[in-house]
Amino acid sequence: MLFLTLASLLATAVFALRGDQTRIRYTEVEDRDVELFRAGQTYKYRLDTQIASGIASVSNQHAVTRLQAEAQFHFTSDRLVALKLKDVTIGTTNQEIENPEQIQPIQLFKETALKPEDLRLLELPCEFDYADGLVESVRFHQQDQSWSKNIKKSVLNMLQINLKQRKGMNVELEQTESWQKEREQQDLLTKSENQIQQRMFVMPEITLEGECQVTYAINPVSRDEKLKMFNVTKTVDFHRCKKIADIQYGPKIEKPCKNCTSQQELEERKLDRTTIMRHVVAGTPEKYGIKKVETISHYVFKTLNVLEESPMHTIVTCRLNLVRAENDRSEIERELRRIETDGKSESLLYSIEFDTKEKLFYMFGDEEFAQKTPFDMIKDKVVKVESTLKKLVGMWSDKVKGIETEATLIYTRLVELLRMCTVSELEEICSRVKDINRKSETEEVNAEHILIDALANAGTLNTIKVLVEKVKKGHIQPTRATRAIIQLKDLPAPSEKQMKVLTELCENNVCKQHEPCYQVCWLTVGNLVGELCNDELTVDDAVEMLKPQCHKQLKTDFVSKIMRTFEKFETRYRKIMILKALGNAGLEQSVTELEKIIRNLREDPLVRMQAIDSLRRLRAVMPHKIQRVLMPVFQNVRERPEVRMMAASLILATFPERPILDQIGFTLLREPNRQVKSYIYRAMKALSKSPIEVELEVARHLKSLLKLAGVTEEDEEFFIRGSRFYRIPVYCHDTKEGLFFDVETMFGSDDFLPKHLTTGLDTVFNGLFQKNTLEISFTQEDVEQWFEKLMDMYMDFGYGSTKSKLRAGRRSSQESDESDFGYSKIIKGLGISRRVDSDSDKKNNAPYAMLNFRYKDIDFVMLPLEEEFLPHTLKKVLTSDRQPTIDDLKDLIEIFQGRKFHSQVAMNLMEHSIKIPTTAGLPIRMWHVIPMLASVQGQCQAEIRGELKATIKLHPMISLTHLKRIEVWSPIVHTGVESTRTMSVNIPLNTQLIIANKTFKMTLEVPEKEYRIVHVHTLPLTYVTEQEWFQQRTPLIKRIENQNLVHRLKRLENTYCKRNLGMPIKITGEVHVPHTYSYKGIISTLLTTENHLLIDFVPEEESPRKIVITGEGRFFESSTESRTSHRELKSFHSKSVFDTEMDSYYEDENKDERQFNKFLEEYEPTKLYKHFVSVEIKTVGGRHEKQAQMEIEAHTDSEHRYVKALLKMKRSALPSMDERSPWTMKTQVQLVLPDVLSTIQQYKQQEEQMQLRLVAKINTEWGCEEKQLIRLNINGKQARNPEWRQKISEIERLNNPDARKLYQQMIRKAAFLNKYDISADYENLTPETKIAWNLLNALLKTRNFWQTKVESKKLVQSQRSGQLTATIVIDPMTHKHANVTLKTPVEIIRIESLTLPMKMKPFKLVKPGQMQKSIDSFYDIVRDYTVENRQECRVSKSKIETFDGVVFKAPLTKCYSVLAKDCGSKNPRFAVLMKKIDNQDKAIKVMIRGDVIEVQPEDGKLVVMINGKLEKNEKTLKEFGIDYNRNMVRIANRDLTVRFDGKECSVKIASTHKNIQCGLCGHYDDDSDDEFRMSNNELTSDLKSYHKSFSLVDDECNSDFAETHRQEEYKQLKGRRYEYDYDDDETFGKNKRQRKNDNNEIDPIEKTQTMEYNQKVCFSVKPVKSCPEESYPGKTKEMKVGFVCFDRSSTEARRLLREARRSDEPVKLPSTKPSFVETITVPSTCEVY
């Protein structure tokens, strides 16, 4: 007993001696003991504060800071109150806490030893005014510091309750009108009743976290008159704050549109916070005492919507419990008398004194803090930077393991240290870093280069000053300086002084004389101005409100400087560069100046396009202004199309309202320019599918506009050749996040290359739409000049080959000018004036191109391609008129003669941090950054001695970390949560490449020592670290384990490629496998749990030393294959094994079989070519050498209608698969392709004679000892069911334009092979192959469960057990659905309307202008591909469709008419003329560079004459670029392609002839409004004059020409040429309407009239006169007509109504007995529109 007594006394003494570290168990007072606040009393409260940081939902692991103290409030008077903290204890822990909102006992925490100075600051008292519950005019001791002040303010914040709804002192935020009315009503209620009422109200209030709207809820607890208790609950609305105590560093979040959301809501998407306080109060609102207060605040940090359920968060819980009230005032009053204040008072708002100094130091450097900087308390900064650099160099220098994963975090620490340094300290660091390089053991990593990058990433005024001075003095090379300046984006705290320092560098001669430095400098200055002045779309933090950086004069001065610089520049490149700088700034003051440039038609088009683009950063600030500026430009059809499209692109990015969208959509109906129309259609279609929230309203309206536009499938095929806009989404609808890949092409009216080509990436993450997150664009003007020179040197599309040129040279030297076969006579006789002097024009307009890189809507760098900037060797190649030789390339080759290179870069990407106050008085810092370290070193050597030999040694290393952190900051202790994802890659390469004639060899050296190839580490953790200001100790960390993924942990320790290849690749680590491989599952796994993955290459003694890859290719060699081998395909399989039900539904199979066998019998190719490709991979050295081979040998005819191929593959046995002998594969293929026709008319006429089948026979066997075998037969044909045939026959019988158009569309849609019969015989299949087939079969049935019918069957006699058959029929109209029948030995599977993944139209049978032609080289393949994408002009007997899609009637005569001619050169490169011989046959004359080619039909076949001589020799025809067969002649060269079948002519010309071509095929500039330019280059609307100006009239044809012009009709037709595919009316009847006179009068036609009622439909008994389409009644009269009626519900009535609407012929009625007689008005004459 004595012992226990002594122990108790000893414990009491120990606690007494500890003083302020005593842990006392306080006891709360009872409700009845709560005293009301009154003067002279001291109220003692127990203060408990807890701040816990972790990851929500996935783990209970938290890093926690805990504070406990006694808070004494001494009421000197009813208004004047003093606060003093005593017995302060601070502790930390890093452990699992199940409920972080509940304050844990202080005994669970490790107590932090407080320095006496820190403890003294915390215990200094303060005074404040307490007026009606509001805390005002807080006065602190002058030695008090901001961090200790804020802890005291957090206590005062809990004391504040505005029960009287009084507007506090210095409150600028107004109460909302609705709550003001509610307050008046509450005042009346409280005056009439003396009870505490349950009520709620909202008042603006200054709280610790900001001046915000605060919602109060008052609820009475006790109705006892003697004991009045009530609860007061407060919540802070952070969306409605006037001031907020946040400090931001780095780029701010920008609103995507001006009115889509408020700035506060925008910020809260990344940082969400809530604060709720609950007070237990005794007394009345007029006189009360507070028993206890509890505050709970949540701070959530998320950068992705997918993290909504598991974000990083900090929870703050504060409690203030009344312990006792005393009347003892002596002690606290004595301390109050000793308070030394400077007379200043503060509000309750969080004190940002230190944070303000920190940010101002970043902004203004030493100039702002001449005496003392905020970081003076940090000692030995220079030494710390030096040691950090040394450590970083060491971590970067290991070539075996690569860059250490921790190196990126060390680099971020280096950047933070540099931000704290003064200029003198930075200069000392720069001098010391040279010693680091000299003492470094490695030469590969340059510490000075790291420091330069770190100075740029630090981005303070001091670091920028030091960097700029070093550039000016030449200590940093301009090339290295350019890279550093690029990194001066996203500065932590931009300022006007930083902008001025950079501007001085731009204007310095060092930068001016180095073009890349000069360019990047101005672009960076523009971006910096934009960051300073973009205040309308972002939220200013507390420092920016205190000291605004952007003022009107700054904006005006910058715009003026830019425009003065712009006016001085003369080159296109520099003008565009300076406008890009202005665009980066995004200033409203620039709009007027940019508008002047945009509207200045004398300015260069590329400069005007850039001026439009420079408005992009204002699209959210002033969308209506941009629309007013650009809409007139877009709507001006005389404007250049590329300028109009650039304007439209920016208008659509402003989220325009419906009236603007309607005007843009109108272009689909009336736009004359094909390029503009194509671009607008594609852009509208892409944006109409947008799932992005801010684009939804625009998307909905665009869908409606597209429906009204009625663009057909044929129109889309026409559009695809023009300017385009594509958007490819990679989007998760559940989380509403994703990527959008955009591709834009804008073509001009005079270029075949796009004027502007853009590939970009837009992002939607965390609900924020970021336009142009990443964009690469290419812009050019007149680059075609270089392209044409290269084409002239290397390729002439067959015509003008070496033999042809030699022959032409001999002819020109032997013959006089008179014997040019009428060429000169024709040219002179036409009197065609030149359109554009292209030669002189190209001299004046030098080629220019530009590659531009944009990130986050900011232009970073542009690479100009202009003769001035071209390397000497490349300039020589592009500007000389001869092909370059090896000697010309010597300069280029010498660069790689063993020269070593090394480059490294370090940077922080996407760095952003924000420091916010918490209700505990301690701030939390939320930080996001992606540090990256990368280096590459190597050596290249190349030589050309008959073969190209190159040796490349390359060793790239890269390390990248994604870091997110929440840190609770105090000068005593740090706690927080952090999540990192790091990946390091280390790939040593040593390669030798040899390329000789038709062969290549590549040798890869296998590393002889171990290398770490990939290192991936993800680690979420909580940490605790003690510190003295910024002097951190090693943190104590604890990883976070995602409880939902603990059981999904997978340990990896596998070695691959060891047994099979002898090259062990070891994979080790621990990874967590997500529950689902979805976007949400993968991201959650990477961010919320630790994963570790190592991939090492571990060579052994038996490992190979080299990997050798060799290849050989031989093409278009003469083949010795039998020319009758294709006949082996006759009746190659029986149709009885297929779906007989489906076969009987379609056409007669026997007829098709006979027709196909006849084709095989009669067809004999004129040429057979052999193609051979082989590839071999083998290992050299090691214990077992491995190899794999592949050979392909193919035999094809010259027209590629028949293919016979053999594929052989062989590889070494793989021990891992228990193979004992080499694995081999042999595949034999025989293939016959269908004929392709050029028009639907040919298709209809020659369908019976042409081969329209695909037949393929494939035999393949593979395996080691026992071979698996499959024999596959495929039969593809066109299948049309009876309903389709009947419908097409009905339409064909009708006689009106609508029926013709519908007929054309149906035939065109169905003209492809849509039915495929497939049979497969198999033998010796392994169980693995069978399992794979069964899985595929099951998947097919389950995915299409409701459309699938399965029928079990017995083994059919005709179907062996080793056979599968399938029939697939694609819907000929939709192309998106198919019927499938699959027969296996045990079941029949039928799937109806199977949805295909995309529209499928395989093996089209009709391709406009297509003909079977000989392909004898790769040269022909390139030529044909280029030609097929050209614009086409089609000419028949009386109709012409121009290159720009205008269709008009202009009947040909017996005089030659010019269809197309080069009218831009002094010596025309080509001319195409055409005339009629009789009513059906035509003749053409093609003139190419002095040669005249004539083609016309004779005796049922086409004959060709070259320069007046009949030519039949195939070799000679080929030299002139002529492909010939009996029914079609094709003439092709680089400039044009002409196809002619004796009746119709198709002309395609190269895009290089835009704006300089003339003839009946139109002007060709993608604009249909200026199509009819006569030979004198004057526009006309008189088609007769237009036709006559291009007709060569002589005595022989004069009478026919005059007669045709007198009788025939000339007019422009509506629609496209495919709607007029039938030139005559023979197919649709003989009712040809002629004009009666010159007044455009025509005769009415007789057809059945209809009258419709709700329940019946009535038809005229006799035909009645009516006007045909495209005409209207002239003279009319009235007549009585009888009508017979039918019930509308009857099938007969609907059939008759359809026929009456579609046909111009009378309808045969089943009954002619009239139901009634009606008087109607009928026309006597009709007039054409």
Image (cartoon, rainbow, N blue to C red):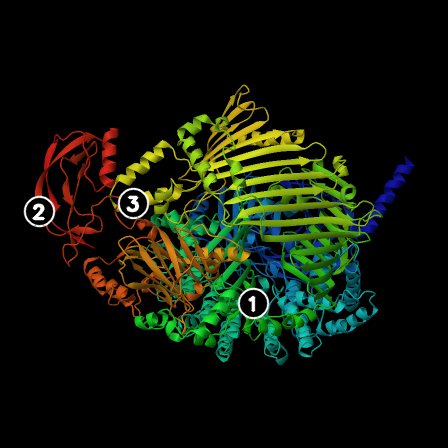
Q: Residues within 10 Å of mark 2 (few under 14, many from 20)?
A: few
Q: Is residue 1564 above or below residue 498?
A: above
Q: Which residue is mark 1?
A: 527
* Secondary structure at numbered mark 3: helix
Q: Amino acid at mark 1?
A: Asn
Q: Which is more toward the observer, 781 or 61?
A: 781
Would you name the residue on which mark 2 appears?
1677
For residue 920, say whether it is visible. yes
Residue at image point 23% right, 65% down: 1598
In the rendered structure, which amino acid carries the disc numbered 3? Arg
Across and down, in percent, residue 628 comes to 38, 64
The residue singled out by tag 3 in the image is 1300
**Quadrant of res 1058:** top right
Q: Secondary structure at mark 1?
A: helix
Give me the C-alpha separation between circle 1 and circle 3: 59 Å
- Residue 338 visible here: no
Instruction: Identify the image quadrant of the C terminus.
Output: bottom left
Query: Is 1368 on the left-hand or right-hand side of 344?
Result: left
Q: Going from the N terminus, do you reach mark 2 or mark 1 first?
A: 1
In front of the other: 1220 or 1155: 1155
On the image, the x and y values in percent for residue 47 come to 69, 48
Residue type indicated by callout 2 = Lys
